[in-house]
Image (cartoon, helix red, strand yellow):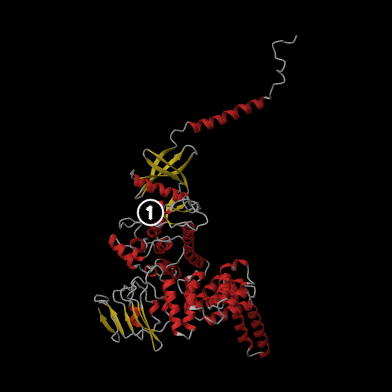
Amino acid sequence: MPDDSIPEDFLDNLKPMSAVFDDAFSESEESLLKDELAKVSQRYVDEVEIARGGMKRILSVTDKLSVRTIAKAVPLKSDGKSIDSFIKEARLTASLQHPNIIPIYDLGTERESAYFTMKLVEGKNLSELIKEQAVNKKNMPLQELMQIFLKICDAVSYAHSKDVIHLDLKPANIRLGEYGEVIVCDWGLAKLIGQIDTEEPTGLDPDVYNDLTLNGVVKGSLGYLAPEQISEDNGLKDKRTDVFALGGILYSMLTKVRPVEVGDTQASLKATLEGDVRFPNDLDSSLPQSLTAVAMKALAISQDERYQSVDELATEVQRWLSGFATDAEDASFLKSVFLLVQRHKNISYSLLIILFVSGFFTWKFIERDRAALAAELLYVQQQESHRQESIEDAELLKEMSYQLLLDYDFEEALGLVNTAIEKDPENEHALFWKVKLLIIRQDFNQALKLLNGLSPRYHRRYMNIAKKYGSFKEDKEFLPVELLKEFYVDLAHVQYSFFVCAYINMNSEDLEQRVACSMVFMEDVINQNIGQWDYDLEIVDGYVSLDFSKTPRMKSLAGIRNLPVKKLNLQGTKVTQTLDLLKLPLEELNIADVEILDPRPIFRIPTLKVLTIGKNQYLEMKIPKRITIIRL
């Protein structure tokens, strides 16, 4: 008998037992996780202090929402000004999203203060690594250290692309993770340069977020401070300020000590302003001179004498890693050839074997069969000729051309690169190097013809320059002086601008034109931000007299290096280097109240007759008797 108590649709609503279990557990799990999140009243727990600085402390905490261990920063002071600075740092750092910059997770307030959270990088900082190597004498391979340095440069270069400068770069602010991470931290002193023309504004107002030096208080870390962070007499803080600090980091990675290592604070500041930095090779003679030269150039007192961007500095280090000479070391031709051999050992060894074999057969057959000897020598010559037509030889010739340019041998430099192109007509690097040489020589129309045959990536800037200035003149002529400033701006390369100036000085027969071109370079390229220029200039009997004593902020003399300057007054200026003086036919020189870092090379100028110095300058130095000394 059927049971009337069972509903008619009972059988239709039956489900498999597996489906019942899936529904039950699925609903239960979702509910549990949501409930767990909803019940979290305190997100960050298990706080353990792991670091403390001048403005904040860093805690290791557990984030109960994401169930992970992270770092949490809290300010040491709870006053409004300190908390505002703390929040500014967090927001500015959060705007920088780069693999080598610490990522910010969260920003908030608690207990009348503020906090922000970030990635917890397990490992050590660069300062600790340097100390360990100094104590244990077990150095990490220099190539690995330079890879770390390049990652630091990548982070700073990215920040600069967003118009942010760090202003407190030092080894202690570089975290090294256990799995190869290199993280630039502590952006508490960072500053926004301004974003009127930037393509990707960060949304932060420079007027609000800039952390300027207040009331004469120096902000930064001793040993890595740039001179302009101590005194605005040395210029305004800009991207080159970070270049100086990166030079200090590179110096420490090489030598295991700070660039300025003085216990007393005032003494450290004074040493920084005077550029009192020991040359790294004096501390360790085994260090590569190419890298030490890079570090010292980055640490130049004058902003104009440093690398003008982080990318320029990083390129120099990358050149060393790739086995090339750096621009800073001013390598000799022989060293460049040696480095080329080192980069291509297999080819070089093969060539040596060929030369050895040819010598052996020369000795063996010279007495037996002159005809066979001639045939053997012809074979070797053919093999060598074939090698000279290879890409390697073209690359060598291009590099030799660059070295000749550094020696101002413009004609030979162009001749060698032409030979390189003959050997390898498809070598675009050699072709583009010729374009640069032609631009330096102001042969714009020839450069334009070459650019028309090159890949598009070579075009834009140099194509615009060649078109613009080729319309003003014929090749083999010089641009009018009034166009030079605009040309230097378009060229946007300090070193190439210097070569333009040098080429005019060495090839123009008009001394007045040479002097005028040099002064444009001096005022608008190598000594920027000087303000009002005031100097006396006189040309007599083919020689030049210059008095810069009324322009006390002038720092560099690079523009007059190739002029026939017989009298020069630098009294009271900020010139510190002697390199630009050594080739001048000087007879009278005034360096009173000028803080020349090492005046001894001046005493070796063969034409120098009269030297004017300050009352208390160089009292203990031995000055040649042929030089008349006038003390003011």
Say which residue appears at 66% left-offset and 85% top-offset: 378
Using the rendered view, name the quadrant where residue 256 is placed.
bottom left
Say which residue appears at 48% left-offset and 67% top-offset: 316
Q: Is residue 597 left or right of residue 510?
A: left
Q: Is residue 199 above or below residue 559?
A: above
Residue 38 % position (x, y): 49, 32
Residue 406 in view of the camera: no
Tell me how many marks there are.
1
Q: Residues within 10 Å of mark 1 (few under 14, many from 20)?
A: some
Which quadrant does the N terminus fall into? top right
Q: Is residue 53 left or right of residue 25?
A: left
Label 1 sits on a secondary structure element that is loop
Name the residue beneath numbered marker 1: 211
Q: Is residue 394 above or below residue 176?
A: below
Q: Is residue 507 above or below residue 264?
A: below
Residue 144 % position (x, y): 48, 60
Residue 306 in view of the camera: yes
Using the rendered view, name the quadrant where residue 29 is placed.
top right
Q: Is residue 598 above or below residue 372?
A: above
Residue 608 % position (x, y): 34, 85
Which quadrant does the C terminus fall into? bottom left
Q: Label 1 amino acid? A: Asp
Residue 416 % position (x, y): 57, 80
Q: 424 or 301: which is nearer to us? A: 301
Q: 273 or 540: which is nearer to us? A: 540
Q: Residue furthest right?
A: 1
